[in-house]
Amino acid sequence: EKGWGNNQSEAISVRQMSATSVTYMGGADLDLVQLAVTFRLDADGGNRIVVEAPSGMQLICSTPGILAKMSLPGGPPDCQDDPLTLTLNETMTVSSTAQGTDFAFAIGADLPPETPAGNTFNVIVKDRQNEVVDAHYGAPGVPLVPLAVGPRPTVVWTSSRAGQRSVVTFTVEFTAEVAGRVAAMYFIFPRTREAEDEGDTSAFTLDARTLQDVVIPGSPFPVRSGGVVISNVAGAKLMLDREGTIAAGEYSFSFPVLVPSVVPSNNVWYITLCSQDSCEIPSCGVIPGICHQPPQDEAAVIGSFVVPGFSLGQSSPLIDEVMQAGAGYGGPLAVGGLVLAGLGAGQPW
């Protein structure tokens, strides 16, 4: 990257804050979508985060329940909507490793009816004296397209104890009938850039030993025969029948997972809608720092929901309803509707 001072004949090098991303479901004119911000610091001292959005987009942190501090230190940050500013009650510190420390949080956003002309974000970390500690200018935004989806999926879980099995259930809303557009739904579990290393304990993984069926209550969801594909590291992908129709309504998807001993810094679950079967997540080895991100292939990706994850020991806000519906600690979530058999370990992508 290059920056310019007063003498514009001389370019100076500018080092952008690394591993910075801004992710959200790019549905035109959606209100209060969940938006996740990730970045990596290599210096101590930051206690204030400013996020500048593209023209026409309103960032929101003051609406109850929309701010998830995830890996930010301390208690709930003080928040200001315009300009979006989070003030922490503890200073961000960096580990002694040369790679720095990853941070992540989630806020809300009201999206405009079409993609802004300058569709980029600025993420700026400042200290208590309002001096810039690190920053990334021009982080790419998501293209906006008409989508018949609700703004934010919900998530419930049956356990948040380290090393224990938990049934994690996502509910996604389709606000109108969708025919032939969605080829796959990709569920990506929280993990770190070290998650592919043997013995890593900071990744949510599918519990292949007691893997249960995926249950979709309500109207039948058009998953093709044999169209459930899993990976113990990355997540799960549902391959849809392109001739089928997704009726308007809410659909729930359940996965038994093992809770890690250390929750990843980027504690976000992504649900990606794909227009092609081939959409895949980036490899840690190919794109360092963003191994846990939604698929990047613009030709194949319709959009990605952001679902903030739960921390160790955190109770699910809807756990009573889940248990009453039949989701026991060791069993599947069987609440009626269509049961998709065929999930199993070791199936190829």
Image (cartoon, rainbow, N blue to C red):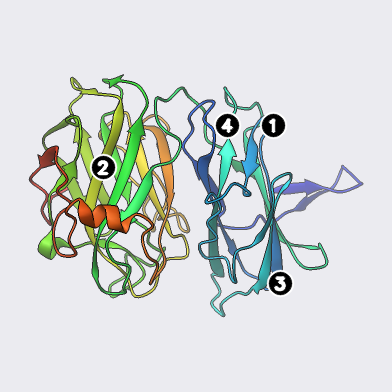
Pointer 4 or 1: first along the chain: 1
Q: Quadrant of residue 101?
A: bottom right
Q: Which residue is mark 2?
A: 252
Residue 55 tag number: 1
Q: Amino acid at mark 4?
A: Leu
- 321, above or below 77, in the image: above
Q: Which residue is mark 3?
A: 45
Residue in view at x 53 percent, y 59 percent: 104
Is residue 34 toward the left or the right of residue 302 in the image?
A: right
Q: Find the distance from the CA under tag 2 to the CA under tag 3.
A: 42 Å
- Dot 1 lies on which element? loop
Residue in view at x 59 percent, y 69 percent: 75
Give neighbour class at mark 4: few <14, some 14-19, many 20+ (Cα, 10 Å). many
Q: Marks 4 and 3: which is nearer the front?
A: 4
- Of 139 and 11, which appears nearest the observer? 139
Q: Which residue is mark 4?
A: 111
Q: Quadrant of residue 199?
A: bottom left
